[in-house]
Amino acid sequence: MDPAMELTPGVLLIQGNSALRKSLRRELERDPYAILAVNSLGEAVARLKTISYKLVVCTDAQRSVSWSDDYELLIDKRGLLTRSGGRYELYLPGVGVRTQAVLIMPCVDLAGVRGAVAEVMTRLDRMNAPGTPGESPSRVSA
């Protein structure tokens, strides 16, 4: 990630279902994150051209064979950071995507999404901590 890129302490949430998007936003706001919730991948891509986010969270289920195919506009498909037992996948962002990571977790479990976001934010904080041995923003598996 470009060190000159300033990140908001925030999360960009992608969820097409209006009621679920509002519920997820409220659930994630219980932790100390600024949340911007959008209804489509297109809207997310437009936002990411002008604003940087610490994490992009994709909870919308798509129709592709794999999660990475669903969100290929946002991720570096070769940049899988971790896969958590079928719960979620965490990727490095694609070129020009202004975020540290993209969390793909198609589900409607509010507490599950909140827990995964907390896990990932902790991991990102560890990766960015100066002098942290053994941690780097390269591919990692869990």
Image (cartoon, grey):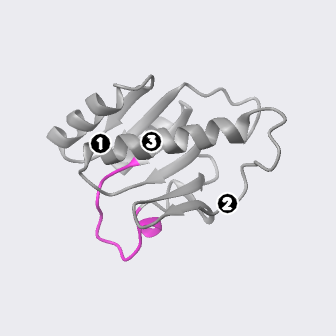
Mark carried by residue 140: 2
Mark 3 / mark 1, whichever is N-terminal? 1
Range of residues picked out in magenta: 58-70
Q: Is residue 58 left or right of residue 138?
A: left
Q: Dominant secondary structure of the magenta stretch?
A: loop
Q: Secondary structure at mark 1?
A: helix
Within-10-Å neighbours for mark 2: few <14, some 14–19, many 20+ = some
Marks 3,1: beta carbons within 8 A = no
Element on which disc 3 rests:
helix
The amino acid at mark 3 is Val
Q: Is residue 4 above or below residue 62?
A: above
Label drawn at residue 117? 3
Mark earlier in primary sequence (2, 1): 1
Is 108 situated above or below 38? below
How many callouts does the rendering have? Answer: 3
In percent of width and height, residue 81 lies at 62, 58
Quadrant assignment, res 64: bottom left
Q: Say which residue label 1 marks.
A: 111
- Image quarter of the N terminus: top right
Distance CA(mark 2)–CA(mark 1): 25 Å
Q: Quadrant of residue 141?
A: bottom right
